[in-house]
Amino acid sequence: MAATLTERTESVKRTLRGLNLTVLIPPMAAVGVFLIVVDAETWWEAVVLAAGSAAGLLVIERWTADEDARVTVACLIVSAGVWVFGALASDSHSAFFGISIVGPIAVPRLARRRLLAALALVGFVSGVGALRLLLPRAELPGDVITYLVVPTIVLVMATGLMFANQLFYNLIGELEEAREREADLAVYRERVRFASDLHDIQGHTLHVVKLKTALAEKLVHADAERARAELREIHELVTQTITQTKELAYAQRRLNLAAEVENAKNLFEAAGIAVRVERDGEVDVHTGEMLGQVLRETTTNILRHAQAGHVRISLSGGGIAITNDGAADRPPELRGLATLKHRVAEDGGVLTVKQEDGHFTTAAEFPRRGDRKDGP
């Protein structure tokens, strides 16, 4: 179950990063080309500005794949050099474009001292812009806005947005970890309940067997007939316990349908899965027991094998249908349902499973009491 939820977390992150790649790369590339065409006065200026834009686009692409750490340092050096060149050597006011992409992506992903790194980044960009104002060819107040105010504001806004973006990704991870813990707890609760059922079956019987064995031992010489009667009762108790244990192991023990519906609902909700229960009619006791077995087995299968976000349980006068999303492309072998299918058939019912468009449906239908044909 933990592996399944971890895979779900990574799937969500991949989807979000793919969306970021689709949304960010085309407009950023277009802006970079536009700035080069407008700002570059010579071919070598165009090459330098293109290097800064390429560094920014490369970091975006690697960031969407969660592999930006491999190229961040190199791209940060390139984009910083382009900014220094543009501000102090070539009068290219758009040279900060590359570092305004690389820096805001790199800083929030640092393991520590992120705030200090953000201040250093803003200080570097604004410092280079301030040095520009000391050059003899500086034009005031235009260069103040072009090389100092605009780059600083853009960098601060972009860095703030990326901090928020990183916080969003961290929140997704924390939520999925919480769901994983809740799902593990749900499975643990199911195991505890199974252990409790097993204790109910065997605990009392073993205690009674112990007492009757001690009694038979005392009576074996004083009252042989009564001792034999006690031994026969012990034999019957052990036989019944073996039968009940087998029924419990193969989900054949008598179940209460209403209690099973409530238990399934609680298990799903504990695993972070939304549940909707639809009821249409009441079932007789025997049919309810069989439907409860189907529901219990299906609940276990969903928790173990699916990546469900929603489950719908539909009850009718003679049947049940459980539908969940998040079904695997290749459904696992569900041996428990295969066993139940034979039992349902023996009782005159039909159990079917169907997978379609990522949804998996398990349904069992029995003829209603008035529709059943009496045997000969």
Image: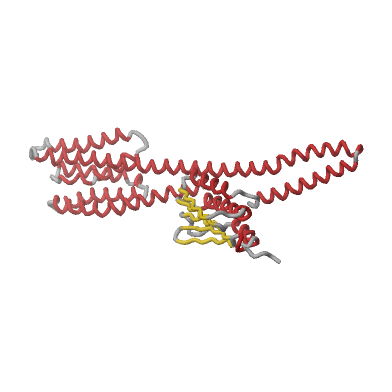
Percent position of residue 122, x then y: 23, 36
* Residue at 32%, 39% in the rendered image: 108
Percent position of residue 213, x then y: 82, 39
Single out the residue that lies furthest toward the bottom. 376
Percent position of residue 357, x then y: 44, 60
The front one of 334 and 33 is: 334
Percent position of residue 57, x then y: 27, 50
Position above or below: 61 against 185: below
The front one of 88 and 120 is: 120
* Residue at 15%, 54% in the rendered image: 37
The type of colouring in the image is: secondary structure
The front one of 10 and 190 is: 190
Q: Quadrant of the C terminus?
A: bottom right
Position above or below: 372 against 94: below
The answer to whether 19 appears left or right of 41 in the picture is right
The front one of 307 and 145 is: 307
Single out the residue that lies furthest toward the right. 221
The answer to whether 259 appears left or right of 235 in the picture is left
Counting the numbered discs, the total is 0
The answer to whether 346 appears left or right of 186 in the picture is right
* Residue at 35%, 42% in the rendered image: 168
Q: Quadrant of residue 137?
A: top left
* Residue at 46%, 43% in the rendered image: 179
Position above or below: 145 against 310: above
